[in-house]
Image (cartoon, rainbow, N blue to C red):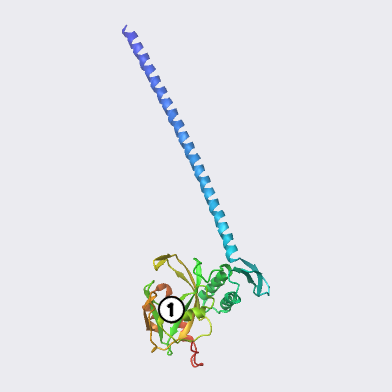
Amino acid sequence: MKYAARMKYAARMKCAARMKYAARMKYAARMKYAARMKYAARMKYAARMKYAARMKYAARMKYAARMKYASHMKYGFAILIKNVSILHIFISPKAILHISTGDTSYLHIAEGDTSSSKTGGFMELRKLIESYAPYNEAEARDRELMLYALAHFPDVLSRDNPVCHFTASNWITNPERDRILMVHHNVYRHWAWTGGHADGEADLRAVALREAREETGLETLRPLYDGVFSIQALTVEHHVKRGRYVASHLHLDCCYLWEADESAPLRARDGENTGVRWVPIGEVLKIANEPVMDVVYAKLNEKLLALPRGGPSPKTL
């Protein structure tokens, strides 16, 4: 009887162990199946997200292409052509075709104002940059950049172009050429040259002269150099101007050299600068305190001091 009880107990234990093992296997199978389902769901979700991302990217590319096309239709397009000698071909009341001579010229259609003065000014600016003799390697590279911008961006004379646009600046010296007239800039909070944006005006010399008068109060300035004195492509860091955020961009700058009398009255321009003063030429870099402009100011002083003296008196403007 005792032996039979033991056998019965052992059978029960064996059966319980089998049931427990079976339950474990069943649970493991369920967990494995659940894991597979979860993995499959993740893969399916990932595939959907990937597909959605592709569709979103495709939509963005399609939208960008449409915007680019619209931009081309609105402002015109540029096509590289060679050996063409036609200057103006009117193709519609709102568009004018510019073709200039040379081994490598650009066909540019600009919509809007078809006046010969405006379109001619744009072409004159391009010719001015093309004929400019670079002073060093930096100017040679910047000249290439300016010509590229003129060929590919119809709105490069306007601040509407958020990537780059033309500006005009001034380097104003006294008759002895030992002082430079500088203004204290409100936005950047340092002493700098005078100048401003083209804002659609292709005559950068006129822009520079106007800015010089407005920012310094000078009435009389005499040009010391025939044409553009210096060119430079300048990076402009993001900043806030009159409560509006301005993203980083490039200034394609043409600088003009002027002479003015130190005895002439000076006046700061409200909203633009808080001071105007004559700075000894040897202290320009120190007072400017703008490392990014040190190379430019040093170049301007170097070119100024290298100019020959004893020529005819500068014409007053």
Label 1 element class:
strand
Residue 312, above or below 211 = below
244 vs 55: above or below:
below
Count of marks, rendered view? 1
Q: Is residue 264 above or below residue 21?
A: below
Q: Residue at x 43, y 31 (%)?
A: 31
Front residue of this view, candidates 311 and 125: 125
Quarter of the image that includes the N terminus: top left
Question: At 37% from the left edge and 75% from the top edge, which residue is drawn?
Answer: 190
Neighbours of disc 1 within 10 Å: few (<14), some (14-19), many (20+):
many
Give the residue type that dot 1 points to: Thr
User: Does residue 168 appear to the left or right of 287 in the view shown?
Assistant: right
Report the front residue among 238 and 284: 238
- Residue lying farthest to the top in this orientation: 1
Q: Is residue 116 left or right of residue 207?
A: right
At a point 55% along the width and 57% down the height, the residue shown is 64
Q: Give the residue pinned by disc 1.
A: 194
Residue 91 place in picture, x, y as percent: 66, 69
Residue 107 visible to an observer of this rendering: no
Q: Quadrant of residue 286?
A: bottom left
Image x and y of residue 316, in percent? 48, 89
The x and y percentages for residue 267 are: 38, 82
